[in-house]
Image (tube, helix red, strand yellow):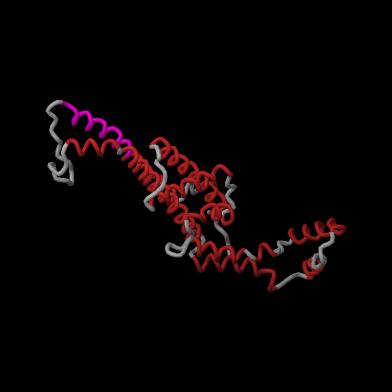
Amino acid sequence: MIKHTKAFKRFRDLSQGHINFVVLTCYSVPLLKATLEAPGAIVPTPDHFKGNSNDITALLGFIASYQNEIARSTLITVFSYFEAYLKSALQEVIEFHGGKSEFQRKAKNRAERFFRSVPATVQANKRKLQDIPNASKQAKYEKYARLLEQAGFRFPTDLLSHFGVTQLILKADDKLGFKAHEIPSVLKDALLYPLTTAEKEIIERIRLERNGIAHGGGTPIRLATSLRDASSLHTLAAAVDHHIVDHFFLIQQP
């Protein structure tokens, strides 16, 4: 049994790797500050930089803003991982069903099955529903709809499933796929994930903050807030992944 997508494991590992780096930084920077402020302090030799390239005053200046920089990088990084996770998860769904062409073929075949040969009884019941809608005939419509459903009839919404699969494939494309502002729509409309108002607001707020930072603006962000947002995205990704595995990783015969 599939427990989670490969995309979710990758998202979880990458996000945790960044959080581990934040933890390491939050331990090491205060220690460095204490070292530099001690009497007779000597600047330690850093990895990848010349030891004499920055004096104590400069380093203490960097330290003063380190939490803000870590907060900004955490928000950008984890949201980017979340966006990449969703696109990769869609691609996994497509591959699970045989790849782009095979997935489309299955959807089309199921939709067209009743086009090829419709039993007389099904055809007769279908005719009962090919009418101008009339509220007074609702009981009649429900009766014949049930009969058609029992026969496996494909209603108009079922016939559009091939188009839905085609659009999903487009949204999952690495270059031409969905943009970050479309994430709520992909979750709600493509995957039918029951996105709550609170979840949508979290996605939108983090996305806008990410855009502000990436474009050289945005309001200052506290590290505690950024870490909380990273945790919220992990929780949402876990819920989305459970939904995807439960409903879309199901072997379907042609």
| Residue placed most toward the observer, 41 or 6 | 41
| Residue placed most toward the observer, 59 or 126 | 59
Image coords of residue 158 (percent x, y): 66, 63
Image coords of residue 151 (percent x, y): 74, 62
| Residue placed most toward the observer, 10 or 68 | 68
Residue at horizontal 49 percent and vertical 46 percent from the top: 205
Image coords of residue 127 (percent x, y): 81, 68
Quadrant in the rendering for residue 43: top left
Could you tell me which quadrant the C terminus lies in? bottom right
Image coords of residue 148 (percent x, y): 76, 61
Quadrant in the rendering for residue 123: bottom right
Residue at horizontal 47 percent and vertical 62 percent from the top: 177
Residue 122 horizontal side relative to residue 112, left or right: right
Residue 235, compared with residue 116, is above or below; it is: above
Residue 36 horizontal side relative to residue 207, left or right: left
Magenta-span inclusion, residue 33: yes
Q: Which residues are magenta?
A: 22-38
Residue 148, compared with residue 3, is above or below; it is: below
| Residue placed most toward the observer, 46 or 81 | 46
Residue at horizontal 50 percent and vertical 55 percent from the top: 181
Count all numbered tags in the image, as a single digit: 0
- Residue projecting furthest to the top: 39
What secondary structure characterizes most of the magenta part? helix
- Residue projecting furthest to the bottom: 116
Residue 116 horizontal side relative to residue 16, left or right: right
Magenta-span inclusion, residue 138: no
